[in-house]
Structure formats: C-alpha cells, structure tokens
Amino acid sequence: RAGRKVAVCEQMEAPSKGKTRVRREVVRVITPGTLTDTQYLDGAANNFLLALHRSGTGATRALGAALVDVSTGEFWVGEAPGDGAALLEAALLRQPAESLVAREAEPALAGHLAALGLPVTSGEPSWFALRPARERLAAHFRARSLDSLGVGDMGAGIQAAGAALAYVQETQGDSLGHLTRLQRLAPGDALMLDPTAVATLELFERAQDRSPRGSLLSRLDRTSTPMGARTLRQWLLRPLLDIEAISRRQDAVEAL
C-alpha cells in the first residue's frame, strides 16, 4: 500500500559445522502490482499492473497499454493512435496498483503517473523492444503468431504487453501458468467512461461521502465469489454497445 517492493529471500544450502554464513538468494519480488496474497487484496477489485509505451512519431505515433492482474490471471492489451488519451483514461479507471514504463524513455508519462499518486517502476528498455516482446508473448501463450490471440495488428500495445510479461516473469518466477488468455482492450467495443462519469453516476461510491454503500455496484452486487464481484465491476466500467452482446449477457445473468 505504501508503493514499495519486498524481496523474499530463501536459504539455498544447509549450514555446516563451523560455517557462519550460508548462501541465500532472492527467489521472488513482491510489488504493489504483482501482489497475490488474498490476505492483503480486496477480493471485489482487481489488482492491476499497468504497462505503458509510446511508439512512433507524427502520424505514426501511438500509445500501447497493458493491464495484468497476477492474482486472477487477467491480461488486457490495447493500442490507440496519437497521444491515446482515451485509452490511458480507460486504463487508469481500473485503478492499477503500479505502473511500468521504459527507463529514461518516458519521463513525461512517468511524471504524469507519479502526480496521480501511482507507483511508477522504470523497466528495462529491452523489455519494450517490439520483436522480443512478440516472441515473449507468443512463447508464453504457446501461439504460432499473435494473430491467433487477436492482437497481431498492434505495435505499441504488443510492446507494453511484452514488457508487462517480462516484469512479472522477473518478479514472480515461473508461477504464471494461470495467465492463459490475452484480451483486447478496445475503446470501440464498449462505452468509454471518464472519471467524471464514473463519479457522477456513483458507480462505485457515493459522491457526498465516497462510501461504497448506496453506489450502483452495491445495489447490483449479489455475487457469491470474489471473481464474480470483479467481473461485475468490469462490466460496469465497460458498458456494451452491441445489442446482441447485451442480450447474451442478460440471458446469461437470468439463467443464473
């Protein structure tokens, strides 16, 4: 909660007679955006790591964003042309616990995130390189190409997602088998809500006292599991635009 990281060390050898020191190694690093211990997490909300990357110049300039929740296995990736203000706003509405940007490459973006009170981690520039990012994602998801994952047309988005995956691999080791699906965060497939709309509509808290009691979420939430509560929260943040998709969702809810 303080925005700090914790290194977990383990003893790697048995102590021997007369030996005062034994070898220890860092086996895991826990960060605000990679926390998985349910004792410290709000079961009704995601704990996202947000990775951001800008690529290109002029007409080819784009912003890539990736959201990863190591505790649930959710992995979202999106890309928008220009400054990508709408995409950034949509990502920040998920209230990420930590952000990741390339070291020394994104000073303005890092400063903006820090001003919002969001812990900022400076990642290795090599994590954001396009070709290694593509290869890293394809290897993890065991895909021959990223086209099969629905994100093959992206550039900056792939760089952000590849960096996010590199970071969680660096901090979590090999315990990422539950990251099995890559979802597209596309502004066009849902109504984009800004912070003012979320606050005015009192989706998650009342305006007068910022209490969750009396919010739309509190009125609708009859879920039985933390996963269900998180899903409902994401639905409220991304209202569907397609009538058929809305009908399918309503039918699924009524079937419960």
Image (cartoon, grey):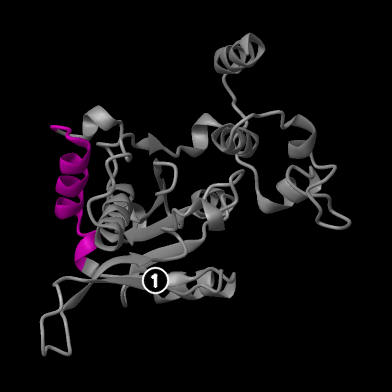
Q: Which residue is mark 1?
A: 121
Near-viewer residue (60 or 23): 23
Q: Give above or below for 167 relative to 87.
A: below
Outermost residue to the front = 17
Q: Toward which corner of the image does residue 226 lie, by quadrant?
A: top right
Q: x and y percent of residue 201 in the render?
A: 79, 42
Near-viewer residue (70 or 75): 70
What amino acid is found at the position of numbered circle 1 in the picture? Thr
User: In the image, is residue 129 part of the stretch drawn in magenta?
Assistant: yes
Q: x and y percent of residue 191 in the render?
A: 61, 34
**Residue 78 appears in the rendering:** yes
Picture residue at 46% right of the left edge, 75% below the top: 4
Q: Residue 30 vs residue 204: left or right? A: left
Q: Residues within 10 Å of mark 1 (few under 14, many from 20)?
A: some
Query: Looking at the magenta stretch, what is its main secondary structure?
Result: helix
Q: Give above or below for 158 relative to 238.
A: below
**Residue 106 appears in the rendering:** no
Q: Give above or below for 241 relative to 215.
A: above
Outermost residue to the right = 208
Q: Could you tell me how many numbered marks the image carries?
A: 1
Picture residue at 16% right of the left edge, 81% below the top: 22
Q: Residue 105 vs residue 199: left or right? A: left
Q: Residue 134 vs residue 76: left or right? A: left
Q: x and y percent of residue 8 in the render?
A: 33, 70
Magenta residues span: 126-144
Q: Give above or below for 103 relative to 148.
A: below
Q: What secondary structure is marked by label 1?
A: strand
Near-viewer residue (88 or 120): 120
Near-viewer residue (221 or 10): 10
